[in-house]
């Protein structure tokens, strides 16, 4: 147990109480000793011995001299790098041979006082001394707070198979990190809660990852959800498994459970909503600060109504294994609101409120609000801030008018639009037909109906070894481009290169034969066999 007072205060207390204790009666000594032990948390016998000795003062605890100082740590760091950064258990037996080899080749010179202590270090000491550079080398933050084992053991474990047929109000919870491509720094999280019985989903943005904010979010959700919070199942993160959340659940008679470490399937209900709702709405960009959290709060205010009242979802009814094959059977798709209305555990008053809320909601207005806030989120990810005014009737009419043609523009969610790439207008390698193309063009002008394969064979026969068979596709593309250009000259009156009327008629017939052949080839390839 931790000391209630400092060491200096205890020494002052010994000086003040000792004389009165030694001069007191048996009853007074017992009373003084009880108060002294309660304040100092000393063992009773130790307190008696200290108070009975006149002038006795608790000795100051002197810090132990460091065995492994900076010199040893620096030498160990050099040896760790020389061993290709192996762990302490592998580095410990390697140290004698490695030190000898480095000294023999003149790479290391250890002091006589440092070398014995370095070779006497255990594997655990080596790992402790190298913890900070190893974490920095891996790009991780050292010293992340962890839940104490006693607190973690006080929360029972619940697996996926333990959910039999719960009533509405048994919810799984998880955090979604909006960190982008790096976990460094501070960024916004989304707290996701999913009801196992109805798949009703609630999302709350958190500015930081903190247990006190989780408790505050649960307090607010208990007032807005259409059912009481009966069970709260989470993972093993410190934002969930801590004294504040445990006390909150005990105060409100909420069953608090956790999943097994590294078993995401234990929380399959909420894990599915992380992707189907949060990632689908917000995307994978990095969001930081109060403005991003407020924008997410506005998005979730509209999306919770749109998703829970107008978005049907599948729910797993049965899963069985037949040898190496897993067979799953699902209930018919239904909205979370419809599942609550069909549940016998929900009161009639709650069902009437749900029906009234659904009758008053406009799904297109909600979807327009979601799209508008997504524009602001996309701007925040890009580093700019937009002011999104409330949705007006004129905006809603424009949104409604564009629903029939929105598919032509591709992705409608601003948070998922890819950055447009510039058109490719350069070559990555030299054109192999650049030099012989004037010769090939003269062959085409003389015999326009020649195929690309015949032209390549003729080119190979005239220049052996200069052109490989793999140039056939390039030749076909170049010949096709030439025929398109020739057809344009023919159609738009650009003039033909034939000198006489007979040559001009021959060229027209050849181009026509080439075009008709290409058309017949396309038609034949489009007809199913």
Image: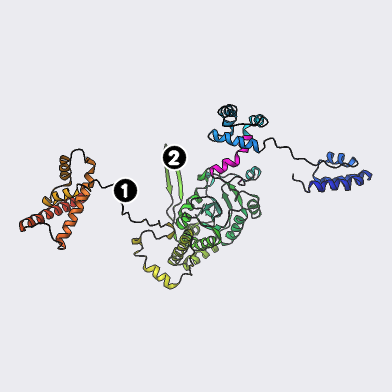
Vertical comparison of 498 with 391: above or below: above
Say whether marks 2 and 1 touch (CB < 8 Å). no
The x and y percentages for residue 382 are 46, 59
Query: Seen from this angle, which residue lies furthest front?
Result: 106
Q: Which residue is mark 1?
A: 428
* Spatial separation of the CA atoms under disc 2 and disc 1: 52 Å
* Residue 501 can be seen, yes or no: yes
Q: Residues within 10 Å of mark 1 (few under 14, many from 20)?
A: few
Tell whether position 86 is magenta.
Answer: no
Q: Which residues are magenta?
A: 125-145
Q: Residue at x 60, y 42 (%)?
A: 132
Q: In terms of secondary structure, where does tag 1 sit?
A: loop
- Residue 260 showing in the rendered view: no
Give the total of numbered labels: 2
Q: In the rendered view, would you say 159 is above or below 294?
A: above
Q: Which mark is residue 321?
A: 2
**First in sequence: mark 2 vs mark 1:** 2
Quadrant assignment, res 134: top right
- Is residue 131 in the magenta section? yes
Q: In which image quadrant can residue 97 be found?
A: top right
Q: Is residue 115 left or right of residue 399?
A: right
Q: Main secondary structure of the magenta part?
A: helix
Q: Quadrant of the N terminus?
A: top right
Which x, y percent locates residue 336? Answer: 48, 57
């Amino acid at each position: 147990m931790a000391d209630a007072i400092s060491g200096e205060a205890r020494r002052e207390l010994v000086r003040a109480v000792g004389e009165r204790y030694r001069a007191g009666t048996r009853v007074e000594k017992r009373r003084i000793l009880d108060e002294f032990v309660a304040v100092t948390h000393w063992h009773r016998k130790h307190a008696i011995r200290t108070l009975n000795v006149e002038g006795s003062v608790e000795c100051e605890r002197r810090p132990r001299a460091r065995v492994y100082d900076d010199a040893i740590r620096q030498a160990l760091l050099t040896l760790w790098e020389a061993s290709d950064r192996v762990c302490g258990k592998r580095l410990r037996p390697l140290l004698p041979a490695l030190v000898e080899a480095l000294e023999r080749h003149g790479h290391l010179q250890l002091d006589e006082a440092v070398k014995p202590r370095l070779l006497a270090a255990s594997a655990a000491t080596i790992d402790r001394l190298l913890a900070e550079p190893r974490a920095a080398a891996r790009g991780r933050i050292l010293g992340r707070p962890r839940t104490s084992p006693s607190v973690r053991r006080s929360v029972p474990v619940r697996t996926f198979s333990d959910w039999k047929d719960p009533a509405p109000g048994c919810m799984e919870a998880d955090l979604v990190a909006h960190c982008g491509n790096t976990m460094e720094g501070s960024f916004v999280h989304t707290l996701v809660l999913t009801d196992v019985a109805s798949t009703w989903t609630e999302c709350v943005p958190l500015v930081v990852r903190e247990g006190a904010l989780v408790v505050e979010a649960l307090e607010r959700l208990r007032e807005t959800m259409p059912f009481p919070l009966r069970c709260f199942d989470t993972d093993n993160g410190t934002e969930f498994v801590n004294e504040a959340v445990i006390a909150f659940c005990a105060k409100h008679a909420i069953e608090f459970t956790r999943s097994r470490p590294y078993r995401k399937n234990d929380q399959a209900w909420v894990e599915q909503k992380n992707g189907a709702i949060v990632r689908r709405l917000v995307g994978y960009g990095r969001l930081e600060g109060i403005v991003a959290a407020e924008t997410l709060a506005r998005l979730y205010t509209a999306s919770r109504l749109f998703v829970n009242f107008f978005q049907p979802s599948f729910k797993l009814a049965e899963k069985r294994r037949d040898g190496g094959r897993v067979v799953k059977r699902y209930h018919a798709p239904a909205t979370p609101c419809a599942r609550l209305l069909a549940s016998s555990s929900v009161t009639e008053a709650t069902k009437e409120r749900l029906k009234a809320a659904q009758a008053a909601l406009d799904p297109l207005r909600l979807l327009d609000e979601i799209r508008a806030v997504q524009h602001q989120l996309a701007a925040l990810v890009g580093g700019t801030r937009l002011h999104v005014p409330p949705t007006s009737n004129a905006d809603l009419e424009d949104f409604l008018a564009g629903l029939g043609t929105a598919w032509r523009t591709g992705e409608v969610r601003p948070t998922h639009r890819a950055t447009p790439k510039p058109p490719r207008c350069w070559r990555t390698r030299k054109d192999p037909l650049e030099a012989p193309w004037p010769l090939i063009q003269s062959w085409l002008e003389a015999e326009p109906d020649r195929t690309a394969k015949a032209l390549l064979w003729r080119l190979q026969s005239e220049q052996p070894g200069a052109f490989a068979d793999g140039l056939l596709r390039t030749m076909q593309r170049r010949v096709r481009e030439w025929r398109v250009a020739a057809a344009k000259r023919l159609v738009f009156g650009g003039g033909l290169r034939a000198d006489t009327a007979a040559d001009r008629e021959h060229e027209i017939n050849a181009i026509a034969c080439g075009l008709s052949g290409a058309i017949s080839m396309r038609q034949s390839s489009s007809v199913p066999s």
